[in-house]
C-alpha cells in the first residue's frame, strides 16, 4: 500500500503539492488525474523518492520512500520523459536495470521486445517517442517491482499499443502482486483501466475514490415523461446532478443506486425510459460539480 | 542491501558509460608523460650517440646521460605541466560524473532506482579516481618502458616515479574533490565549470590582489613580505601543487630542491600533508553538499540559493578593488579613477553575476542593494590601503617586543660575490631569512634609522616617495622577529647623510657581516686552499702564494671595521680577488669569484700581502700609475644640446650657451701627452676595477661621469704587467686645465 500523508512540496515560491492525503491500495490500477501543472508529476516523483517532501510522508508499504533503498526496490518509475543512456541500445538498458533491480526478468524483457517489435541492438536515440515509452514500460514490467509509476506514459502510444499495454498490465496483475499507478491529464485515457482515481487540482486532491463506488452511486437516465406534472413530481423526488433537455427528451444524471433509480422510474408515468452507462468523464463532472468545480475546465479544457 | 556482485555490476556499467572521459584522460596524460619523455629522450639519445661517435670527453657523455635520466624522471615524476593536466582531468571527471544532478530526466532515473545515495556517490567518485589512476599507471609504464629502451632508466628513477605516482594521485584527488565541491554547489554544467575556475584560482587571485594593493600603496611593503605571502601554504591544490612541482629540480634521476634552505623531503612531506588535508576537507564538504542539495536544483545557477548574495559579494568586491587599482594606476587623477574604477568594477561584476544567476538581461537591474554593499566594501578596502588606515607604513614595533632583527640592502650587489658556495642565488631576501641579530645597540640604531625615515615621511604626508630626495639614499629591508613569535618585514630609506652613526653600526654588526660576506662562512674556509688568491691595485694583478687561510683570517678581522664611515672616508687602495675554479668545485660549472676591497686601514691583510712581496698593498700609490708608465691620456667629453646634466653647471658650455653662443652637439677629445699634465691627471684618476668594490651605494665615491678616460701605457709598462683598464676621474681631484682644455678643443658653430 502506498500512503501519502499531508504531502507538500514547493519549488521556490511555487507550491506544487499541498497537503496531499491519498491511499493507494494494492492490486488495483490507480489513476492520478489533473490538468497540466496540477502536480501529478511532482506527486509521482515524491512517491518515487526522487524528491524530498517539504512536509508529510510518502510511504511505500509503510516505509518512507525518500532515501530508502528497500522502499525504492518496490517501485519502478517511468517518468514523463524517460531517460536512456546516450548511445545505449535496449540491451544496454537491460544490463543497467538488471544491475539495480534484483528481480529484473531478462528473459521476459527480450520476449517483450520481440512482442512489441523493438530491436534490442538498435540505438534508443533512433527510436520514436512511442517506442521509447514502450521500452520504458517493458523495463518497468520486467523490473519485477510491486508498484509501477507511469507519468503520462500512455501519451505517446497509439490506440492499439495502448490496448496492448493495458492488456499486459491486466495480465501482470493476474499473475503477480502488481499495482500500476498512472498519472494522466486525460480522463478518457484512464477510463477503461483504473479501479481507483484521484483528482489533483492546484497541488491538492479534489477527490480520491473507487471507480465502482462512484459508478454505483450515480446513474444516467434518458426519459420522456407523459406530462409536465409527472415530470415535476418525479424530478422533485430524485437527487439530480445534471439535467439536459432536448425537446421532451430528458437526459438526467442522478445520485442513487441503479436499482433505486429503475424502481423510481418504473413507478412513474414515462413514455420512454432507459438507464445508460456513464463515462468516467461524466462521473467526474458530477462528483466535482458537487464540490463547486467545473471539471470540464479542470480536465477537458 | 546490494550484493557485492551487483555493486561491481553497477560500477562496470558506470565505467562503460563514461568511456569517452576515460579515453580523454588517457590521451591527456599520454601527451604529458610518455610523449614528452619519448621526444626528449630520442633527441638526447641522438646527441649522445653523436658524442660517442666523435669520441667526446667522458664528462660530456655523462652529462648527456644525466640529462636523459632527468628527462625520464621529470616526465614520470613531478613536473610543471602535471598539475594543469590533472586539474583539467579532475574537472572533466567531476563534472561529467555528477552531471546527472543537472538534469531532471536523469535524476528521475537515478534517484528512483534502488541504489542508496552514499553508494551512488562512492561509485561515481571511485570511478573518477580509478579512471585517472589506471590511465596514469598505464602511461607511467609506457614512460618507463621508453626510459628502459633509451637506456635512461635507473633504480632510483623507478623509485622516484613510484613515489611521484602516489603523490601525484593524491594531488589529483585533492583537485577532484575541490571540483566536486563546485559541482555540488551549482546547478548546471556551465556554472559548474565557472565554479571550478573560481575555487581553483580564488585564493591565488586574492593573494595577488592583496600583494598588489600593498605594493602600490605601502612603500614599506617589501618583496620579502610578498614572498612570505605567496609562500604561505596553499589550500587550493592546483596552485599549491604547481608551486611544489616548480620547486623540484631533477639532477639525473635524483630530486633536488630549487631552494637550498628547504630540502625536498621536507617540502614533499609538507605538500603531502597539505594535499591530504585538502582532500579530506574538500571531500567531506563535497559529500555534505551532495547530501544536502535538493534534487530539484537542476538547471539552477546555484544549488543553494542562500549562497547567491554571499558569492556575489565574495567575487564582486575583489574584482572591483582590482579594477579600481588598475584604473587608478593608469590615470593621473589617482583618487578619482581609483574609486571610479571600483564603481565600474562593481557595475560590471554585478551585471555579469546577475546575468549568470538569472540568465535574463533585465536581472542586471535587480539587486541594487547588494551592488551598493559591494561598492561600499570595495571603497572601504581601497581606503584602508590608499590612506593606510591600518598604519602599515608608520608601524614600528616597540623596542621591548623585538626579539631579533635582520636587515639588508634591498638590492644587494652580486659582484661582491657572497653566498655563491651555499646558494644558487644572491638576494637581500636571503639575508632576512638567515640573519639573526639580537645586539641591543644594533637594534636601537636600526629603529633610529627607520624612525628618521618615518619622521621625514610624516613631514611629507602627501608625498608617497618620502626620502627619495635624500643624498646617497638607499633602500633597505628589515625583518623583525617579535617576542610573541610573529615576524614582520618592512622596507625603508637610509641615507648616510641623515643617520651616519647608526648606519655604521648596522654595517659593522657582526651578525650582518657574517651573513653578508662569505669570508665569514665555514664553506669559504673549507675551500680557501683550493682558491687562487690575487691582489690588484687597479693597475697590476699580484698573485698571493703564501698561507691563504692566514690571509682569509686577516681579512676577516680587518673587515670588521668595514662600515659606512670607512666607505665614506676613503676609497679602497686595492681589491683582494678569490677565485674557485669550476674544476675544484663539487658539480661546478662556472668559476666562482669573490672580490673584497682592501683599505689603507686593513693593517693585518696588508701586512700579509707585503710578506708575499706585494709592495703595492703596503705602499699605497697615489697616483696608482706613474707618469713614466703612461704614454698618453685621452679624455672624451660629450656635449649635448638638450641638457642631459641634472645640474646645468655640469655642462662645460653652460655659460656660452647662456650667452647665446651656439655650441653644436659633439664629442670632444683631448689627448694629454705632456708629462706634467699626465702627472696631474693621474692624481685625479681612480681605477675602474676598484670602483666596483668602493662606496657600495652608501657614499658617493665622487666619480665624474661626464668624462670618459683612456690611458695608453708605454710598451715597457705593458711588458711589466700593467693593464690598460677603465679609469675614472674623481671630481674633487680634477686639475684646472682639464675643463679649459676641453672647452678649447670644442668646435663652435
Image: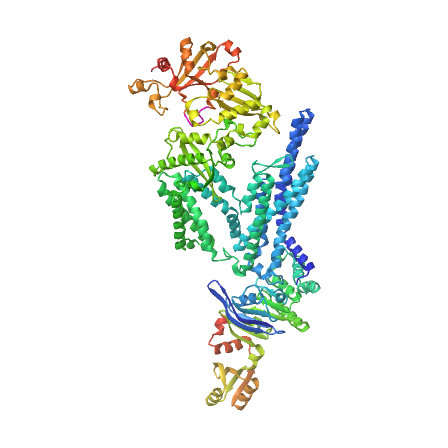
Q: Is residue A279 above or below residue B624?
A: below
Q: Is residue B406 above or below residue A28?
A: above
The quarter of the rendered structure image containing the N terminus of chain B is bottom right
Along the viewing direction, whichever of A37 and A280 lies nearer the viewer:
A37
Q: Is residue B696 magenta?
A: yes
The quarter of the rendered structure image containing the C terminus of chain B is top left
Along the viewing direction, whichever of B233 and B555 lies nearer the viewer:
B555
Q: At 69% from the left edge and 39% from the top edge, which residue is drawn?
A: B145
Q: Is residue B473 visible?
A: no
Q: Magenta part of the protein: which range?
A: B694-699
Judged by its main secondary structure, the magenta piece is loop
Name the spot of residue B163 as percent of width and height, x first: 64, 43
Q: Is residue A160 above or below residue B388?
A: below
Q: Is residue B372 magenta?
A: no
State how the image is colored: rainbow
Viewed as shown, does residue A114 lie left or right of B173?
A: right
Amino acid at each position: 500500500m502506498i500512503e501519502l500523508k499531508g504531502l507538500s512540496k514547493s519549488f521556490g515560491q511555487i507550491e506544487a503539492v499541498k497537503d496531499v492525503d491519498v491511499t493507494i491500495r494494492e492490486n488495483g490500477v490507480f489513476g492520478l488525474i489533473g490538468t497540466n501543472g496540477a502536480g501529478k508529476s511532482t506527486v509521482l516523483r515524491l512517491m518515487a523518492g526522487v524528491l524530498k517532501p517539504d512536509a508529510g510522508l510518502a510511504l511505500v508499504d509503510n516505509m518512507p520512500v525518500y532515501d530508502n533503498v528497500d522502499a525504492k526496490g518496490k517501485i519502478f518509475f517511468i517518468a514523463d520523459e524517460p531517460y536512456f543512456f546516450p548511445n545505449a541500445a535496449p540491451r544496454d538498458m537491460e544490463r543497467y536495470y538488471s544491475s539495480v533491480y534484483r528481480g529484473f526478468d531478462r528473459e521476459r524483457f527480450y520476449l517483450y521486445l520481440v512482442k512489441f517489435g523493438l530491436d534490442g541492438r538498435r540505438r534508443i536515440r533512433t527510436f520514436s517517442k512511442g517506442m521509447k515509452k514502450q521500452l520504458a514500460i517493458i523495463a518497468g514490467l520486467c523490473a519485477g517491482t510491486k508498484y509501477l509509476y507511469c507519468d503520462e506514459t500512455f501519451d505517446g502510444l497509439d490506440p492499439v499499443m495502448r490496448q496492448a499495454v493495458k492488456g499486459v498490465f491486466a495480465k501482470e496483475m493476474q499473475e503477480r502482486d502488481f499495482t500500476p499507478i498512472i498519472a494522466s491529464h486525460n480522463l478518457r485515457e484512464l477510463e477503461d483501466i483504473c479501479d481507483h482515481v484521484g483528482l489533483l487540482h492546484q497541488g491538492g486532491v479534489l477527490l480520491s475514490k473507487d471507480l465502482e463506488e462512484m459508478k454505483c452511486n450515480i446513474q444516467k437516465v434518458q426519459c420522456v415523461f407523459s406530462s409536465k406534472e409527472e415530470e415535476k413530481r418525479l424530478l422533485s423526488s430524485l437527487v439530480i446532478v445534471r439535467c439536459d433537455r432536448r425537446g421532451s427528451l430528458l437526459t438526467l444524471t442522478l445520485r442513487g443506486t441503479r436499482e433505486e433509480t429503475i424502481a423510481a422510474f418504473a413507478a412513474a408515468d414515462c413514455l420512454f425510459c432507459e438507464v445508460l452507462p456513464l463515462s468516467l468523464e461524466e462521473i467526474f463532472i458530477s462528483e466535482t460539480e458537487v464540490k463547486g468545480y467545473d471539471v470540464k475546465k479542470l480536465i477537458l479544457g | 542491501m546490494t550484493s557485492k556482485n551487483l555493486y561491481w555490476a553497477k560500477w562496470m556499467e558506470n565505467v562503460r558509460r563514461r568511456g569517452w572521459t576515460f579515453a580523454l584522460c588517457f590521451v591527456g596524460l599520454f601527451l604529458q608523460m610518455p610523449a614528452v619523455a619519448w621526444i626528449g629522450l630520442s633527441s638526447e639519445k641522438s646527441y649522445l650517440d653523436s658524442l660517442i661517435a666523435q669520441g667526446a670527453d667522458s664528462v660530456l657523455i655523462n652529462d648527456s646521460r644525466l640529462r636523459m635520466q632527468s628527462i625520464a624522471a621529470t616526465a614520470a615524476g613531478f613536473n610543471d605541466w602535471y598539475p594543469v593536466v590533472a586539474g583539467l582531468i579532475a574537472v572533466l571527471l567531476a563534472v561529467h560524473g555528477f552531471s546527472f544532478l543537472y538534469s531532471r530526466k536523469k535524476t528521475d532515473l537515478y534517484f528512483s532506482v534502488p541504489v542508496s545515495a552514499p553508494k551512488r556517490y562512492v561509485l561515481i567518485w571511485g570511478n573518477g579516481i580509478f579512471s585517472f589512476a589506471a590511465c596514469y599507471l598505464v602511461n607511467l609504464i609506457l614512460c618507463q618502458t621508453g626510459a628502459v629502451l633509451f637506456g635512461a632508466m635507473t633504480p632510483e628513477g623507478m623509485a622516484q616515479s613510484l613515489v611521484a605516482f602516489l603523490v601525484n594521485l593524491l594531488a589529483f584527488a585533492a583537485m577532484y574533490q575541490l571540483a566536486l565541491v563546485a559541482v555540488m554547489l551549482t546547478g548546471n554544467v556551465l556554472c559548474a565549470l565557472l565554479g571550478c575556475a573560481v575555487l581553483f584560482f580564488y585564493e591565488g587571485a586574492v593573494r595577488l590582489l592583496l600583494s598588489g594593493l600593498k605594493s602600490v600603496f605601502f612603500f614599506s611593503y617589501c618583496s620579502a613580505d610578498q614572498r612570505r605571502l605567496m609562500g604561505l601554504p596553499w589550500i587550493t591544490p592546483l596552485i599549491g601543487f604547481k608551486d611544489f612541482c616548480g620547486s623540484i629540480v631533477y639532477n639525473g634521476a635524483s630530486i633536488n630542491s630549487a631552494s637550498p634552505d628547504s630540502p625536498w623531503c621536507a617540502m614533499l612531506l609538507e605538500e603531502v600533508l597539505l594535499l591530504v588535508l585538502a582532500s579530506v576537507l574538500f571531500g567531506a564538504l563535497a559529500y555534505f553538499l551532495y547530501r544536502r542539495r535538493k534534487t530539484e536544483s537542476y538547471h539552477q545557477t546555484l544549488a543553494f540559493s542562500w549562497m547567491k548574495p554571499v558569492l556575489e559579494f565574495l567575487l564582486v568586491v575583489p574584482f572591483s578593488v582590482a579594477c579600481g587599482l588598475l584604473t587608478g594606476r593608469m590615470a593621473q587623477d589617482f583618487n578619482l579613477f581609483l574609486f571610479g574604477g571600483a564603481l565600474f568594477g562593481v557595475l560590471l561584476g554585478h551585471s555579469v553575476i546577475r546575468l549568470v544567476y538569472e540568465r535574463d538581461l533585465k536581472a542586471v537591474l535587480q539587486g541594487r542593494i547588494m551592488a551598493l554593499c559591494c561598492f561600499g566594501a570595495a571603497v572601504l578596502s581601497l581606503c584602508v590601503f590608499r590612506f593606510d588606515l591600518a598604519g602599515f607604513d608608520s608601524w614600528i614595533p616597540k623596542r621591548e617586543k623585538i626579539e631579533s632583527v635582520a636587515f639588508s640592502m634591498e638590492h644587494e650587489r652580486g659582484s661582491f660575490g657572497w653566498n655563491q658556495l651555499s646558494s644558487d642565488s644572491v638576494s637581500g631576501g636571503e639575508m632576512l631569512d638567515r640573519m639573526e641579530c639580537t645586539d641591543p645597540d644594533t637594534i636601537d640604531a636600526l629603529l633610529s634609522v627607520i624612525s628618521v625615515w618615518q619622521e621625514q615621511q610624516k613631514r611629507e604626508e602627501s608625498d608617497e616617495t618620502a626620502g627619495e630626495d635624500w643624498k646617497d639614499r638607499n633602500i633597505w629591508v628589515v625583518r623583525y622577529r617579535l617576542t610573541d613569535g610573529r615576524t614582520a618585514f618592512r622596507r625603508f630609506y637610509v641615507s648616510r647623510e641623515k643617520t651616519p652613526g647608526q648606519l655604521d653600526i648596522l654595517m659593522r654588526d657582526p651578525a650582518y657581516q657574517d651573513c653578508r660576506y662569505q669570508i665569514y662562512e665555514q664553506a669559504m674556509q673549507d675551500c680557501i686552499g683550493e682558491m687562487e688568491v690575487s691582489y690588484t691595485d687597479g693597475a697590476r694583478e699580484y698573485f698571493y702564494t703564501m698561507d691563504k687561510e692566514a690571509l682569509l683570517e686577516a681579512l676577516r678581522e680587518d673587515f670588521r671595521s668595514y662600515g659606512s664611515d670607512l666607505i665614506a672616508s676613503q676609497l679602497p687602495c686595492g681589491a683582494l680577488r678569490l677565485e674557485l675554479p669550476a674544476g675544484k668545485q663539487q658539480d661546478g660549472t662556472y668559476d666562482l669569484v669573490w672580490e673584497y676591497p682592501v683599505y689603507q686601514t686593513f693593517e693585518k691583510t696588508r701586512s700579509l700581502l707585503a710578506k708575499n712581496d706585494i709592495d703595492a698593498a703596503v705602499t699605497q700609490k697615489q697616483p696608482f700609475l706613474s707618469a713614466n708608465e703612461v704614454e698618453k691620456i685621452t679624455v672624451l667629453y660629450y656635449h649635448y644640446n638638450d641638457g642631459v646634466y641634472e645640474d646645468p653647471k655640469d655642462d662645460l658650455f653652460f655659460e656660452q650657451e647662456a650667452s647665446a653662443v651656439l655650441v653644436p652637439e659633439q664629442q670632444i677629445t683631448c689627448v694629454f701627452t705632456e708629462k706634467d699634465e699626465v702627472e696631474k691627471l693621474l692624481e685625479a684618476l681612480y681605477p675602474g676595477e676598484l670602483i666596483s668594490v668602493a662606496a657600495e651605494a652608501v657614499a658617493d665615491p665622487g666619480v665624474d661621469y661626464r668624462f670618459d678616460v683612456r690611458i695608453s701605457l708605454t710598451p715597457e709598462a705593458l711588458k711589466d704587467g700593467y693593464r690598460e683598464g677603465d679609469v675614472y676621474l674623481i671630481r674633487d681631484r680634477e686639475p684646472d686645465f682639464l675643463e679649459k682644455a676641453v672647452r678649447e678643443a670644442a668646435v663652435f658653430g
